[in-house]
Image: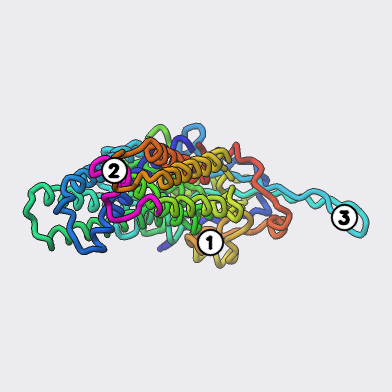
Amino acid sequence: MLKEWPLVAFTILGQMAVGVFWFFHLPFLVRGRVPLFGWRVTWLVILALVVLLTGLAALVSFFHLRHPFRARFVLSNLRTSWLSREILFELAFLALVVLAVWLGWTRSPGRGLVWGTLAAAGLSGGLFLASMTKLYMLPALPAWRDVYTPLSFLLATLVLGDVATEVIVRVVAGPGAFGLDLLRLALAFIGVEILVAMIKAPRHGLLGARPGPSLRPADGPPRIFHWVRIACLAAGFICVGIEVATGGNNIMNERGATPALLLAFAFVLAGEVAGRFHFYGLVARPGD
Amino acid sequence: MVTQYGFYFDAAACSGCKACQVACKDRNDLEPGVLWRRVYEVAGGGWEKKDGVWVPSVIAYNISMACNHCANPVCGLACPVKAIVKREDGIVFVDTGACIGCRYCEWACPYTALRFDARTNTVSKCNFCYEAIDAGGTPACVAACPQRALDFGDMAELRKKYGEVRRIFPLPDPAQTDPGLIIKPHRDAARAAERAAEVANWEEV
């Protein structure tokens, strides 16, 4: 299970990158504005971090390949392989965000071009996540072929994207400047994720999938990963709650990213990592 | 002309001697721990009360299993670099020169046929002894079985000869991959699921 750390890092970093991209652009999309005016610096920082996270995810993924130099052929089975499609959409997402950085940097792009690029990047990010989910929903693996897989991947994207965006916006633009109450949203997402984990987590959730008879050894992740995940998410929930209660996101507050907010990010990140190790521990590789 | 090679396995005849497993390792010079053919020991049951008398209800049989060279090889469909190739005669083999070692096919195969070979840093699996087949010979496992529990041939011929059964406990639903496999079930197989039987030799497979 711990051997799968490159996949844990790849999926978590990739999901956080897409989540940050979505959450930052959502209020601008709703208001029909481009983030060029008044928000240019924050926008560029967000895009640069998204590029960094996605690039890091791609780099880390090489560590789970035994012949990384042959990875240049990884797009050769787009017709049937979800792994090929996942990499295609990841590269498309990365390229489109890089293009958005360049457009932001040049200062005078057309509004239509910016929106077109951002919409295409957002869509590619969504398809990247969908391919990542589909990849694991194999008929041979009932533990993964369950509604829990898309739910947990989506919730990890929402939780990490939401809290990370709040941290970045606070640091770069200041508290309360953003047009979306990310903290209250984070409370809802973290709460839902805790509930989903307690009810539907395979093997350890109340109604989670249990291994059936098969030719694959019934390897189970240690229960501790399940509870560490829930405990970390709960701690993150409390930290976000404290931040909301103390008015950390009030526009009159000049504190920037507070310790409670940074702790909340650290806790939810730790929770997602523990949850992902639990996920990969559900399926054994025979012979290992 | 053969369009889909397959194996026949007689679970009622198999004694679990593992000669097939050893012959496969020998013919293909496999590393320790890499098993292209494996013998699973299915065991379960215990005692049950019938008309006030306790009688044994033990379940014990063996399953010799390798790659089934499926008509719908999900391993090949999942491979991002097309390193798993199906020949015109249905034999599925791994092109180790193209494999990137992502090991995704190991997850995709419901028969756990793909095995990681640390020597080549790629996955590997049964290739139906295709060199022997092409020369008019027999797969090593089939030739080695002292009980004649294994046979091979064109699936159309095997169906005519042995019937249509392709699943016994705990094999997956054949609809997943359309495996090149015909089975004669052991008499205990029908009761295995209800008696909570399980594979008893995970350390060996």
Q: Is residue A179 magenta?
A: yes
The amino acid type of the residue labelled 3 equals Lys
Q: Is residue A287 visible from the viewing direction of this image?
A: yes
* A128 relative position to B60: left or right: left
**Label drawn at residue A170:** 2
Range shown magenta: A165-184
**Label drawn at residue B174:** 1
The amino acid type of the residue labelled 2 equals Arg
Mark 3 crowd level (few <14, some 14–19, many ≥20, 10 Å Cα): few
Task: Classify mark 3: helix, strand or loop.
Answer: strand
For marks 2 and 1, give the CA distance. Answer: 55 Å
Task: Classify mark 2: helix, strand or loop.
Answer: helix
Q: Nearer the viewer, residue A83 or A115?
A: A115
Q: Is residue A126 magenta?
A: no
* Residue in the image at 60% along x and 63% along y: B165
Q: Nearer the viewer, residue A136 or A40?
A: A40
Task: Classify mark 1: helix, strand or loop.
Answer: helix
Tag 3 residue: B49
The amino acid type of the residue labelled 1 equals Pro
* Mark 3 belongs to chain: B
